[in-house]
Image (tube, rainbow, N blue to C red):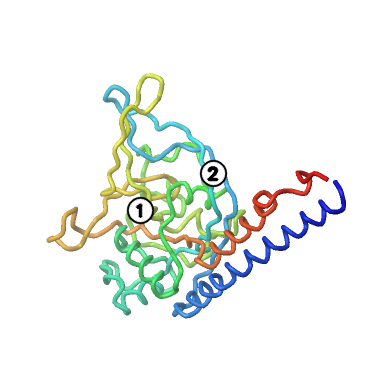
Amino acid sequence: MSVRGAMLSHKRRVIAFSIAGCLLAPLIAIALSVHHSQADIALPDLVRLDTGEISYQRAGDFALSGQGVESPHVRFALSKPIDIMKYQVTSADFQRCVDDGGCHPLDARFGAPSADRPAVDLSWHDADDYAGWLSNKSGEIFRLPTDEEWIIAAGDRISTEERYDRGHGNQTASQSMPAYYAFSPRTFDLGTFGSNRNGVFDFAGNVWEWTNTCLAQVALDSNGTAISESTNCGVRVAEGRHRAYITDIVRDPRASGCTGIPPTHLGFRLVREPRLSERWIANVRRLLFSVPMLFGDSKSIDA
């Protein structure tokens, strides 16, 4: 390449970077200012999950020729980083949502729960209401994790193999369900069961957790290929020592759905989506890295 060609290539890159900076800097500033002005509550402790891939048994109800069969093993990888709460949402956290009018009061069947222990007696709707309230108060986007995200976050604290309770043995005994009490209100202080390799606490105990994953009902052929699939979002996946499917209980008998009180052993934690400013920064980075391709690379310039 000649000196003239190299200088032309450099000039093109400088112009491209300058244009990108001029166009996107104001948008980034706006996104940052919007986020700052909306923040009205302290954020929970979060742990960043940049990558992760698992081979696991997919959640759902699978059938072959009308007979129930084991769910297939599939692979899942995070497509983008997410932040997940380091601890489960506490009773005090949830009560702030209730006091602010964003959540419905819970049914205290066993007396007032300890403020620094996980919130329980929660339906999926209660958890979703809290996610919406926290999103509005913080200016962030919070939601329940999917089943796959939960398993990746749990890491070494759970097995990705058999995720089902087959009903063997005494299900209320601590030796068959270590640290989980499905039919009692017993909970423990945050952090009691330690952190996993991701730095997230209490996946190995305390309470089961709601996910955002709906129950999939899948018919398979003899080769294990899905020939039909439907989704029932009236039933959600809950995760803990094993996987469970729980009905979206509603407290208002006038509303459609099953009415009643949710199980005592269910709590939740949330994930945070990247905020607008973070998405802009990521887009800027992608744009800047693509500048040589858009404006030509020096190697392609002839003398």
- Tags 1 and 2 touching, CB below 8 Å: no
Secondary structure under tag 2 reads: strand
Q: Is residue 248 above or below residue 191?
A: above
Looking at the image, which residue is at 56% across and 49% down? Answer: 155
Spatial separation of the CA atoms under disc 1 and disc 2:
30 Å
Instruction: Report the amino acid beneath label 1.
Output: Ala
Looking at the image, which residue is at 20% across and 58% down? Answer: 260
Q: Which residue is mark 2?
A: 77
Which label belongs to residue 60? none
Q: Nearer the viewer, mark 1 or mark 2?
A: 2
Residue 170, image x, y percentages: 36, 44
Q: In terms of image quadrants, where is residue 188? A: bottom left
With 296 as the anchor, is 88 left or right in this view?
A: left
Residue 185, image x, y percentages: 34, 62
Instruction: Report the amino acid beneath label 2.
Output: Ala
Going from N to C along the chain, the mark reached first, 1 or 2, is 2
Which label belongs to residue 182? 1
Residue 82, image x, y percentages: 53, 57
Secondary structure under tag 1 reads: loop
Looking at this rendering, what residue extends furthest in the top direction?
222
User: From the image, which quarter does the C terminus lie in?
Assistant: top right
Label 1 neighbour load within 10 Å: few <14, some 14-19, many 20+: some
